[in-house]
Image (cartoon, rainbow, N blue to C red):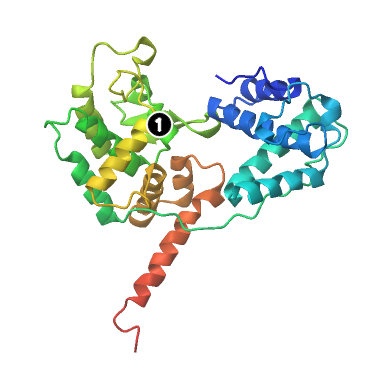
Amino acid sequence: MIDKKDNPEFLNSFLQYSSVILNKSQNSIKEYNYDLSNFFKFMSNHLGLSSEEDIKNTDIKGLDISFLKQITLEDIHSYLYYLKEQFNSKPATLARKTSTIRIFFSYMTNKEKELEINPAQNLENPKLDRRQPKYLTLEESQKLLEVSNQGVNGSNRNTERDFAIITLFLNCGMRLSELIGINLKDIKFDECKMTVIGKGNKERTIYLNKACMKAINSYLEVRPKEGIKPKDEDALFLSERLERISRRTVQYIVEKELKKAGLDTDKYSVHKLRHTAATLMYQYGNVDIRALQELLGHESISTTEIYTHVANVQVRNAVERNPLSGE
């Protein structure tokens, strides 16, 4: 839950609208609250309404619409510059905060109609670096699955669970939040598919291949049947405390298995397994880019197209390795 008691009324109004009307996820609401409260704290000092040496201690509860009317596009630029200079914020971080500010002022101008002029109307997104995603090769992926599968029915009582987690990540390309949110009722075993809740609370179907079905069924055979916390009885993956597995626990599991496979945990992570699944499906599965977009839950096709760039790079490398390339 978000503590809203220190927020100005207009911020809480925006958060309620985003949650109820826009149906934003709880994580999105938390990000909105964090980004905007920090933005308002900076602006309060920037506009001379507060003189706190440490901006994070600035009291913003009493701010009203007259405060918002003072903010200009140049002031917003000053805030983004402050983030980059003081915290070395990366372009992706600045882009997220820029988007939040733009959405907020659009709401105050067009929905609440409290502002006649939208200071963020011409606010541009910071230019992002188009980096190639890091991913495991087919051989590295097979090695990771192999070491994760070692010990099934052995001494590690969580081996079946951990192997199922790795298998789903590498085969389905789901997000971390999607995996921990899986409920038993979401899985249609007779149809080999399940539904997950992705970004923006959007539901989509993920089809499960033989490897996924086998891993899930093996885990269900040893999944605890009693003592589960009532609110998490339907959760697929459970922690040692018999409640829905947490984000941090899944990250720890992936890191542990990567180390067992001799893979660099500074280079690879949970999200890199999603990149791996997408890349392998595109390279070896002859998957249409639109089908891959739907499978990954990308809102824009341009996000999915990065995997075609990966394939193009590999084609070039293959040509360069031709033994006749030096002739």
Q: Residue furthest left?
A: 154
Instruction: Please tell me how crowded label 1 is: few (under 14), some (14-19), or many (20+) other residues with Cα within 10 Å.
Output: some
Q: Is 35 on the left-hand or right-hand side of 25?
A: right
* Closer to us: 290 or 51: 51
The location of residue 154, given as percent across then percent down, is 11, 32
Residue 239 drawn above or below residue 42: above
Looking at the figure, which quarter contains the C terminus?
bottom left
Instruction: Name the residue at 83% across, 36% down.
Output: 48
Q: Is 37 on the left-hand or right-hand side of 187?
A: right
Q: Is 194 on the left-hand or right-hand side of 84?
A: left
Q: How many marks?
A: 1
Q: Is 203 on the left-hand or right-hand side of 82?
A: left
The location of residue 306, given as percent across then percent down, is 49, 55
The location of residue 22, given as percent across then percent down, is 64, 26
Mark yes or no: residue 95 visible: yes
Residue 123 drawn above or below residue 246: below
Q: Circle 1 sits on which residue?
A: 247
Looking at the figure, which quarter contains the N terminus?
top right
Instruction: Name the residue at 30% across, 24% down.
Output: 239
Amino acid type, label 1: Arg
Q: Quadrant of residue 176?
A: top left
